[in-house]
Amino acid sequence: MGLITETNEQYYAGAQKFLSIAAATQSFTTTFDTELVFGSFNPLEINYALNNFKLYTAAPGVLTYTELITTYTVVGNTVSIPNLAANTSVVVQLKSSNGGNYGLRDAFGSAVEENYDDYSYIKLNEVINNFMVAYIGAGKLIPSAKRTDIIFFAKRAMQEFSYDTLKSIKSQELSVSPNLSIIIPQDYVNYTNISFIDASGVKRPIYPANNLTVNPYENPIQDNRGVPTQDNFGENLEGTSLTEARWAAADDNLLNGEANNLRQIDMAYDGYDFNIGFGQGQLYGLDPQYSQTNGWFTINHREGKMSFSSNLANALVVLEYVSDGLAYDLETKVPKMAEEAMYAYINHAIMATRANQPEYVINRLSREKTAKLRNAKIRLSNIKLNEIVQVMRGKSKWIKS
């Protein structure tokens, strides 16, 4: 069977039509790649908002569709409607950013858009099933294996690939709160880029504070002898961070380039004459992380937040970060271009952890894993020949003043 099972209307419009017959209760099974999510049929109930679809009907010979808000049930992808007249047209409309094409066009949501570009991926659960069919069995290199072992190594492969092979960079558009922080996303592993968006929609990089300041993980309250004090349960009493308070008060001065304040915090600006055109010709060799006005950020692991310099209060920022691809169970998607590399990783991992395996077999599987991982990186790098040609043509141009 072909891998594409949706009709064009199902894929592009997120809609599937049915025609009822004479029966006490009609059941219709949808074949979307998207699973139906059902909370309630009643718009007045709070769980109605959980639905990722709306149901519309049109009487025989009528072209106008209205939303069905009388009793119906959904089990899996099967919708059951009682007391439906024969030859009634029924439409299951997944929620879309444009509201869909039926009724009042008010089926607003993102279920349709989330299904777009789905063909270029395969679910991790399908990778596991395919591996068990192709690599495990009598007469094969792995005669038997537990499904739990395969799931474990498949997850490990997904984690390792997500860091530097798969295009698993996620992004969030956030506003910096007045307390100069944003909460680290739930599936965050590491950041790749943080920028603020200016009035023209242009991305401006924000730099890490690095050696400028730090967010202490603990702030024990000390007595007059410098010894941390404890509460009634024997745990250290925690205070607020003076380092963070001083940084919040000073960084505006840094960004404004005020020489006195720069010298007050013992940065490497000493020796420059800021009174003559802001040190004209005297900033050669200045560290770029200090000579910019976009602002800084630090990662506050104590509070699970990212903290920003005060010039970024209420600014719109975009956080780009890496996840490990395992935040949402085995429905995680794997790019098809990395599918073979996943199989090679799992195959090597299972054989390498078994006793009394020939070393030459393990070495061969290791080389195969490395080669297929390299192929996956090249494929996912998305390098196009015409783009390389354009870059090389630009190299031959003279820069004239």
Image: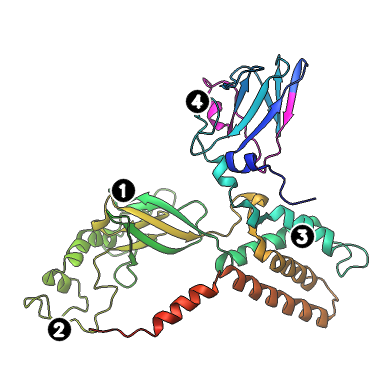
Where does residue 101 sit, x and y in percent of width and height? Answer: 54, 32
Report the span colored magenta.
Answer: 27-54
Structural distance between the alpha carbons of marks 1 and 2: 38 Å
Q: Amino acid at mark 4?
A: Leu
Q: Which residue is mark 1?
A: 177
Q: Residue at x 74, y 76 (%)?
A: 368
Structural distance between the alpha carbons of marks 4 and 2: 66 Å
Pair 1/2: label in front: 2
Pair 3/4: label in front: 4
What is the secondary structure assignment of the residue under circle 1? Answer: loop
Identify the mark nearer the N-term, 4 or 2: 4
Q: How many marks?
A: 4
Q: Which residue is mark 4?
A: 104
Structural distance between the alpha carbons of marks 3 and 2: 64 Å
Q: Which residue is mark 2?
A: 281
Structural distance between the alpha carbons of marks 1 and 3: 45 Å
Q: Residue at x 72, y 67 (%)?
A: 340
